[in-house]
Image (cartoon, helix red, strand yellow):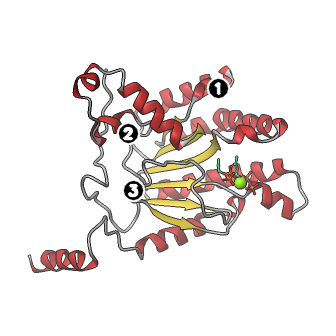
Amino acid sequence: MKPRAPHASSTVAIPPHGELPRHVAIIMDGNGRWAKQRHLPRLAGHRKGVEAVRATVKACAERGIGFLTLFAFSSENWRRPPDEVALLMQLFIGALENEVNKLHRNGIRLRVIGERSRFDPKIQALIAEGERLTVDNRGLTLTIAANYGGRWDILQALSRLSKEDSFREKGEIRESDLTPYLSMNYAPEPDLFVRTGGEKRVSNFLLWQLAYTELHFTDTLWPDFDAAALEAAFESYRARERRFGRTSEQLEEAKRAVIDA
Ligand code: IPE
Ligand code: IPE
Ligand code: MG
């Protein structure tokens, strides 16, 4: 069956946006440096990072955020030393085993994006089970990006689309042809992107979806990220003027028209 993408594209229509972001996407960076500052092994930083994930999921659920997407492991993170990769996999298994029931009790829907086939079958089974259990939940949708890369996502979408008969007949691709095949076809594009740890780059995260996302960079290392740091990101988001290509004057005019009506 052909997939669907129920949310409008920010380059085709002006998406609805309010005081709070509907979708927050976070690059959780700085675990290693957090540990190094304390003369601890990197593992200690990753462990503490899991606690920050818990706190952030809770805070987003309480604030009524619709979608939270967390970059947990990039397609390039396999380049790390094998023992660090093994350890991150162990932490991923632990989190899936211990947290999924809690997510379910809180009405949170779990989704995982990324190329799963490279993971151990045990991880693949835990992901499938977590998604199945929480599929009907209507609270926060928590997406974990694992073995995810933005370029991979666009390429896998294109390659699936190109197998469609309708694609071969038309010979032209519009956004609305491609987006149903992207791995986050169930979510609106992120309104707010946060990267902790001080680096100012996207590191192959959601390349397509970040077209009109507001970017927030903070020096806070991921293990120190908490509800207050999230609130500071929301505060910064509220102060932005999202123009989507239009002029500031056009936005003012539209506001006045609403007030006059
Ligand atoms: C983010 O923290 C966690 C992952 C990428 C898995 P890092 O491990 O990248 O921490 P730094 O950047 O070395 O401090
Ligand atoms: C990005 O962090 C990936 C995740 C947080 C999972 P990295 O620490 O891997 O990014 P670079 O290598 O500094 O760009
Ligand atoms: Mg890093």
Residue at image coords 34%, 69%: 242
> x and y percent of residue 147 in the render?
62, 36
Disc 3 + disc 2, Cβ < 8 Å? no
Q: From the image, tell me which residue sits under label 3.
A: 22
User: Where residue 130 sits: x, y (%)?
Assistant: 55, 30
Label 3 Cα neighbours within 10 Å, binned few <14 / some 14-19 / many ≥20: many
253 above or below 53?
below
Near mark 2 (Cα within 10 A), the count class, few <14, some 14-19 or many ≥20, is some
Regarding mark 3 in the picture, which secondary structure is present there? loop
Up the image or down, 249 lies above or below 82; here it is: below
Q: Are marks 1 and 3 in contact (CB under 8 Å)?
A: no
Residue hosting label 2: 186
The picture quadrant where one finds residue 96 is top right
Residue pushed farthest left? 261
Closer to the chain start, of discs 1 and 3, is 3
Secondary structure beneath label 2: loop
Residue 203 position within the rendered picture, expressed as x and y whole percent measured from the top left: 60, 51
The residue where tag 1 is placed is: 118
